[in-house]
Amino acid sequence: MLVNGRPYRSIWFDSDVQEVQIIDQTLLPHHFEIRSVQSLADMAEAIRAMRVRGAPLIGVSAAFGLYLALRENPVDLDTPIAILIATRPTAVNLAWAMNAARLLLSGLPVAERAQGALQFALQLAEQDVATCEAIGTQGCNLLEQLWQARGATSEPLQILTHCNAGWLATVDWGTALSVIYKAQARGIPLHVWVDETRPRNQGAFLTTWELQQQGIDNTLIADNTGGHLMQHGLVDLCLVGSDRTTASGDVCNKIGTYLKALAARDNNIPFYVALPVSTIDFELHDGVREIPIEQRDADEVLRMTGLDADGVRRTISLSHIDARAGNYSFDVTPARLVTALITEQGVIPAEAAAIATLKP
């Protein structure tokens, strides 16, 4: 998608210098910086520190990280895979990508493993782009139906989203925001309510930046505002992404998603989840009990980074020095609260029978 009018992807391989390049998302929206990733350790740190984040992008990033590891030592396949899988336990795409890579590369001669890993990563990246664009098309058809049902007027569809499910969370296009980008291209008037998404503020830092770059009208709101907007008829639909979805349709997404789904149900507002089929964990059925919820550093809750009045990037404390904080990164929205799942293979109910028809 666009950055200052120029197309970028969130990750790519620079064949001229034989390096993996990423956009360092921890510096957005104040600084746009491209970072070179040259080793397994670099990539593991980038994933862990959320320089790259979002379930689809994490999977692709790990594939490139495996290539970097095998470029140095093609004999040991298991150690780098274990290191990469351990960086983020909740998003299923990471383990899925590593297991697929293991299956492919273990059958290759040792001398061919590094090149095989690179080709796998490149193909995975292209597949992700195509998948996310298809998600956008499927979801755009849904938005157009809603707009037509309202009379196709110039009044914008009011969409509430949570966290960042845009192109920065994938290689390109995104999942939930891909739907919005496709709808914009089709001429559907839109306005997006963007939850700030504490504690890492992906909505405030990333989603608002993405939408501004694409010229889409949006308003940043505090995380607790969504229910109020729904009560007053200011939201037509909720549209979020997913880091892991169970075979029964439970959706694991950024912490706070569950509360938005509850408010949407209470106000008879559709709650849609956009995701690639690769994000579905066909082995899990009870999301609340079976999905591991990542708990991150308490400092993410206790401190915040931004620009001061002089334009200097600073980190400040938000509470007293002895405050303790819990930092649960995700929650699970039960399938009964999800209106539909938007996948590259179609829009389906969040039900086991419908999910079983999808092709992994």
Image (cartoon, helix red, strand yellow):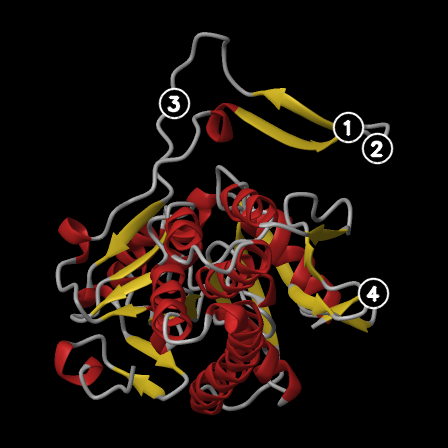
- Dot placed on the residue nearer the N-terminal end, 1 or 3: 1
Residue where numbered disc 3 is placed:
325
Whole-percent x, y for residue 254 in the image: 39, 51
**Nearer the observer, 346 or 89:** 89
Query: SS for tag 3?
Result: loop
Q: Label 2 is placed on what type of residue?
A: Gly
Residue where numbered disc 4 is placed:
4
Measure the alpha-carbon separation of dots 3 and 4.
38 Å
Circle 4 residues within 10 Å: few <14, some 14–19, many ≥20:
few
Residue 81 makes an appearance in the image: yes
**Quarter where residue 358 is shown:** bottom left
Residue where numbered disc 2 is placed:
311
Whole-percent x, y for residue 36 in the image: 72, 52
Whole-percent x, y for residue 215 in the image: 73, 70
Circles 3 and 4 in contact, beta carbons < 8 Å = no
Circles 3 and 2 in contact, beta carbons < 8 Å = no
Query: SS for tag 2?
Result: loop
- Dot placed on the residue nearer the N-terminal end, 3 or 2: 2
Question: Between tags 1 and 4, which lies in front?
Answer: 4
**Nearer the observer, 58 or 203:** 58
* Residue 308 disc label: 1
- Dot placed on the residue nearer the N-terminal end, 3 or 4: 4
